[in-house]
Image (cartoon, rainbow, N blue to C red):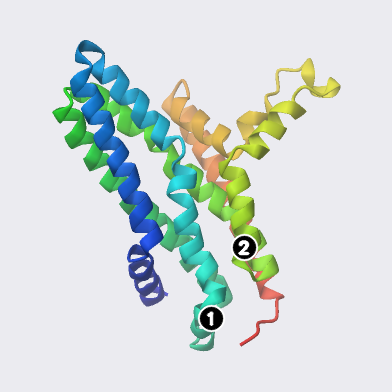
Amino acid sequence: MRNCIKADTLRVQRKKSYIIMTSIILLLFIVACIVSRASGSKGPERFELIINGVMNFSSLLLGIPVFSAVLGDDFRSKSMQTAIGRGLSREKLILARLFEIVIIVVEAYIIFYLGILILGLIGGVPMSQIGDLIVNISKGIFVIIGFTSVSMIFVYLTQNGTLGLVFYILLGANVFDLLITLSSLLPGLRNTDINIGDYAISGMVGNAFYASSFGKGLIWMIAFLVCWVALPTFIAIQIFKKKELDF
């Protein structure tokens, strides 16, 4: 399993789509630095605004090429069948793919952190503000992982990465968040204090990061990991166990 993760991670890191999208994000960071330098006293505020704006789309800009490279190529290239044929169990295969995405996304974010740190200092942004900005954009890591875990169900249900990618894009475009928000206007929920959006992927991650205390934040994070990472992964494994593969 370790060799499988290592080999596939290296493969994805060399994918042109991943390199291009990562480079585009870094180029936008450079734009933020230039704007900050040219804006005088308002520079730090504008730097933060641009960075947050860019990273709000990280689930699409970064998540799509990573998801497509890891899970889409699995069926097109028959690498999944090869791994299973060499003795890797289906459960370990799915876990390996999830771990790969976690590793690749975290590595990309480390690059982004360094870019924000260096360019922020060049742009005259206070170190405390850079630190807050780095913490804030870290939500994207968990959101991408949550979107991936749910979308994997459709990948292994259909044995095709296309439907899973479409579902991932819908999640990344906040289509389901909008539907959840609209559902809170239904008569049975409109007059209650229940906010259904708090239990969506982005809602749970946001609550974990911005909870009033560390304890509440930890509870929200555990709930997120159970509901939106562990449970969908378990469902995907159970579905995939019953599928016949075309070798």
Circle 2 Cα neighbour tier, 10 Å, few/some/many (<14 / 14–19 / ≥20): some
Relative horizontal placement of residue 23, taking residue 76 as reference (left or right):
left
Which residue occupies the extreme right position in the image? 187
Is there any visible trace of residue 231 in the rendered image? no
For the point 17% across and 36% down, the residue is: 118
Circle 1 Cα neighbour tier, 10 Å, few/some/many (<14 / 14–19 / ≥20): few
Task: Indicate the quadrant containing the N terminus: top left, top right, bottom left or bottom right.
Answer: bottom left
Give 134 or 216, whichever is nearer the viewer: 134
Kindly identify the amino acid type of the residue bearing the numbered disc 2.
Answer: Thr
- Work out whether 239 lies above or below 51: below
Position of residue 216 measured from the top left corner of the image (x, y, whole percent): 50, 28
Q: Secondary structure at mark 2?
A: helix
Position of residue 17 measured from the top left corner of the image (x, y, whole percent): 40, 59
Q: Which residue is mark 2?
A: 162
- Nearer the N terminus, badge 1 or badge 2? 1
Which residue occupies the extreme top position in the image? 41
